[in-house]
Amino acid sequence: MLSRLGILLMHLLGRLPLAWVRALGSGLGWVLYLLVVPRRRVAQTNLRLCFPDRSAAQIQTLARRTFVHFAQAWLDRGWLWHGPPGVTRQRLTLTGAVSELQGHEPIVIFAPHFVGLDAGWTALTQQLPRQFTTIYTNQANKILDAWILTGRQRFGSVRLFGRIDGVKTIVAALRSGDPLYLLPDMSFGQENSVFVPFYGVSAATLPSLSRFAKLGRAKVVPVVTRMTRQGYEVEVMSAWPDFPSDDALADTAFMNQQLESYIDSMPDQYFWVHKRFKDRPIGTPSVY
């Protein structure tokens, strides 16, 4: 019942002016910051590790802004997935090297976990005439799962792969010319990860960006989405030269280095609520 009421609310939010939605998101973010203490501590720990030169007050401010942007982005799904298509297009601005995504050559899109990741996906699928693919993890709540799947398939001709589809199916689509929107910058356990620096801290990181680019004979194009007062700015960057290489470890370290430069431009819009350093090298104590 709560899930259905929540989805109904999102439908209603999709009709409101953006300033109202953002104001509601700001209030919700403050509430979450005050009440969801475990996640607040996770965010503060991540920020302290990654920005050791910042004061306690600065870390607290960044963490609070992270919760606010996270909540605002969540409520923005109302207009992303239910608002009039014209409004959605107006609020999503594609900038940068958009020509990198034209044509039919294989492309892996490096889409880091900023709060606007769904806005970036919506902008690409609504505004560009290509069939995009991505990898989807099913939600435990079936009603919520169906809502998210429907929202992410709202525009264009898209394909969402489950993890059970396997690498071969994803690579086949990639080689056929369907860009893969990939979010490889989080920790999913040590089994399939490598340890590379992230802000100077050893972090378990999926080497999947290098792997898919190599298997798909694809170029890697970063797409970074920034929340703005008008909606979102989706910046398409130039393809990385000489990537992938023959060294997946070096490629993954390079990915994190590039990611750091993106985060530095908007540190309060990254997913610091995720336990990025939950997997540690053997013999290294937990930071959480």
Image (cartoon, grey):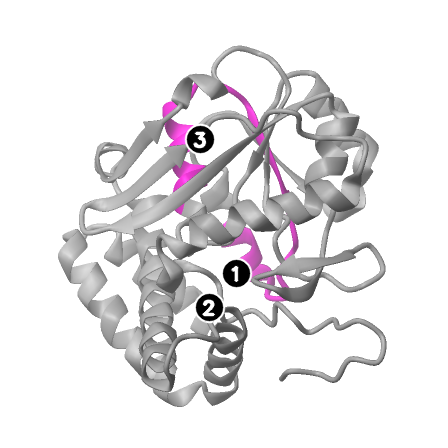
Query: Hey, what amino acid is under mark 3?
Result: Met
Residue, disc 3: 237
Q: Which residue occupies 44% across, 48% down?
A: 262
Rendered image: mark on residue 231: none
Report whether residue 275 is seen. yes
In depth, the one of 147 and 235 nearer the eye is 235
* Residue at x 68% of width, y 62% of height: 187
What amino acid is labelled 1 in the image?
Answer: Leu
Give SS at disc 2: helix
Where is mark 1, residue-wise? 144
- Identify the mark nearer the N-term, 2 or 1: 2
Asked if the residue under mark 3 is in contact with the one under mark 2, i.e. CB atoms within 8 Å, the reply is no
In percent of the image, x 84 and y 80: which residue is there?
Answer: 283
Left or right of 111, for residue 155: left
* Real-space CA distance between mark 2 and mark 1, rounded to the nearest whole angstrom: 7 Å
In what element is the residue under mark 1?
Answer: helix
Q: CA distance from mark 2 to mark 3?
A: 37 Å
Image position, residue 29 (x, y; %):
32, 74
Q: In this rendered view, identify the residue nearer to me: 142 or 137.
A: 137
**Cβ–Cβ below 8 Å for labels 2 and 1?**
yes
What is the x, y in percent for residue 189?
77, 64
Which segment did they paint magenta?
119-148
Q: Is residue 129 magenta?
A: yes
Q: Amino acid at mark 2?
A: Ser
| Callout 3: SS | loop
Quarter of the image where one finds residue 91: top left
x then y, percent, for residue 99: 42, 17
Residue at 61% across, 22% down: 178
Instruction: Specify the quadrant that holds the C terminus.
Output: bottom right
Q: Can you identify the residue that label 2 sits on? A: 3
Residue 157, compared with residue 41, is above or below; it is above
Given residues 14 and 266, the one toward you in this image is: 266
